[in-house]
Image (cartoon, rainbow, N blue to C red):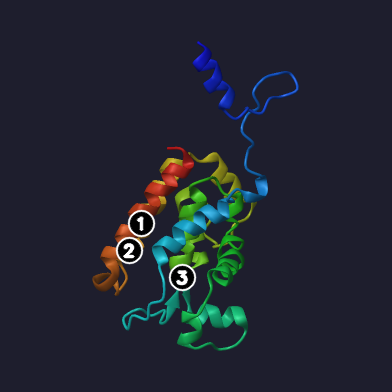
Amino acid sequence: MAAWQEAQARRPAAAASPLGFLAAPAAAPLADRPTRFDLCLDVVLEKEGGFVDHPADPGGATNLGITLRTLSAWRGAPVTAEEVRALTREEAKEIYRAHYWNVMRCEDLPRGVDLMVFDFGVNAGPARSVKTLQRALGCNPDGGVGPVTLAAARRAAAAPLIEAMARARLDHYAALPGFASFGRGWTRRVEEVRRQALLMAGS
């Protein structure tokens, strides 16, 4: 018994509350927690990868999913392939936030649906992604996310909406001339993003 008491005495003392109860571990500060944008961007960047300049890719030189044309528009001047190669993650993050996430109002969409809209917008353009969402919801496909689209998205069950968007995205890719070269990768990306979106939605 004395040996047990001695061993206990050598243990670090646990923090206690003023009432004598052991204090719960401190939660991470809100500022340190990843935002919905951060979580979705991690998925997108994982799929986009690093620098590529495939001759069959109409986007040309691309890094972190940002094409030469997009980077030129962002900086307000033409850029070279080497400047695309040197693009930092931080600058890419700001481009994604301004030109995709905010434009498509992903922050206002249900969890999981935000990822589906964001990733397709990055891959095929914001207007096409929003129209795909609107068609799945039965809304007028005008390409802009307004109060009608947001209300319909919030009423809809997330899982069937995610599945409908995935099917529509596959149909879009199958009709593209580049499907023979890139179809396998596009299909795999849709399946992986669909699965992650369903997890985010809690399905």
Q: Which mark is residue 64?
A: 3
- What is the x, y in percent for residue 154? 56, 42
Q: Residue at x 63, y 27 (%)?
A: 13
**Mark 3 or 1, nearer chain start:** 3
For residue 18, which quarter of the picture?
top right
Q: Residues within 10 Å of mark 2 (few under 14, many from 20)?
A: some
Q: Secondary structure at mark 3?
A: loop
In this image, 127 relative to 22: left or right?
left
Is 132 or 180 nearer to us in this picture? 180
- What is the x, y in percent for residue 42? 48, 58
Is 63 situated above or below 161?
A: below
- Do the residues bearing badges 1 and 2 touch, measured as CB atoms within 8 Å? yes
- What is the x, y in percent for residue 180? 24, 71
Q: Is residue 134 visible?
A: no
Q: Amino acid at mark 2?
A: Trp
Q: Amino acid at mark 3?
A: Leu
Q: Which residue is mark 1?
A: 190
Q: Amino acid at mark 1?
A: Val
Q: Residues within 10 Å of mark 3 (few under 14, many from 20)?
A: many
Is 144 situated above or below 39?
A: below
In front: label 3 or label 1: 3
Q: Quadrant of the C terminus?
A: top left
Question: Which residue sits furthest top?
Answer: 1
Q: Which residue is mark 2?
A: 186
Q: Secondary structure at mark 1?
A: helix
**Mark 2 or 3, nearer chain start:** 3
- What is the x, y in percent for residue 190? 36, 56
